[in-house]
Image (cartoon, helix red, strand yellow):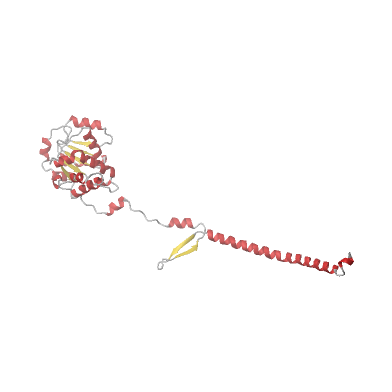
Amino acid sequence: MGDDLGEEWWKHDSKSGCSEEAAEEEDRKTKPTEEVNVQKKSMKRKKATEKSAMPKKILKTNDQQASIIQPEEPGKSSTSSKKRKRKKKKTITDVLASAEPEPGCPADLQNLLTHYFADKRSLIELEELKLHDSFFLSCNDLTHSLSSYLKQICPKWAKVQKQHTQKSSVVLLIVCSSALRAIELIKQLTTFKGEAKAVKLFAKHIKIEEQVKLLQKGVTHIGVGTPARISALIEKDGLNLQALRFVVLDWNWRDQKLRKMMDIPEIKVDLIKLLESGVLEQCKANKVKIGLF
């Protein structure tokens, strides 16, 4: 074997053995530095991900209106968002409160009918709904109480009430938005009505059958109520319009939310229905006049 390998075989073995040992020694020295480098890289990546996950806030400068993105500390985003005040949307009450009160006029009622029936009636039918100035009494200029206004539009009330003898009918009809408002208006009639009899025409706590019997029982001069109940009484023949001479709409009064009667959708629809149930026909026949209080 020794002859075959030659004289130099032992030298190569010794050199290779030394080189392997040196390589192992170098590996031991370089391993700790490589592990440190790997740990440093992982720490850098972790910090980068944490920074990117942090919420960012935008600061606006007054001059340039430029947005500068800065990292925000965790936990402060919720508190800062709460501190931001959102702009309040204006409600109907806010709009009405800022507007100056204006007295109603015949054009207001005409516009109400025109807008409501614009997409429901033909041009010819809309022309038939046109209200002439002769249909109206003088309107309240916001200086009158109910009694003073009624005295103005009906100066011969004492004579009118004596001539009225029909049952299931009234001479004066006052239309308002609610039962509470109707009771309030009846109290305000004291200095005007004299010996005339006033009746409540609303649905709250009063059945329609009871109101029909009450109207049939005796002569009633003044009816105060809501448009829905008055229309229902007309449909049931509990109230006829033969003796009717004056229809007064509680037009300018506002409720707690500063809404007028026409600002409440359901009341507006009920009033239009009431006017169509015979009031406008009586106006055209020159038997009934409309007043806006």
Q: Is 3 placed left or right of 38 in the picture?
A: right
Relative height, residue 126 to residue 229 (above, below): below
Residue 40 % position (x, y): 63, 63
User: Is residue 177 or residue 119 the one in the foreground?
Assistant: 119
Residue 187 % position (x, y): 21, 40
User: Is residue 280 or residue 214 the one in the foreground?
Assistant: 280
Residue 124 % position (x, y): 19, 45
Q: Residue at x 89, y 67 (%)?
A: 3
Instruction: Mark yes or no: residue 251 visible.
Output: no
Residue 263 % position (x, y): 27, 47
Q: Is 46 placed left or right of 208 in the picture?
A: right
Residue furthest out toward the front: 4
- Residue 290: which quarter of the image? top left
Instruction: Mark yes or no: residue 44 visible.
Output: yes
User: Total number of numbered labels?
Assistant: 0
Q: Dividing the image into 4 quarters, which one contains the N terminus?
A: bottom right
Q: Is 73 placed left or right of 195 in the picture?
A: right
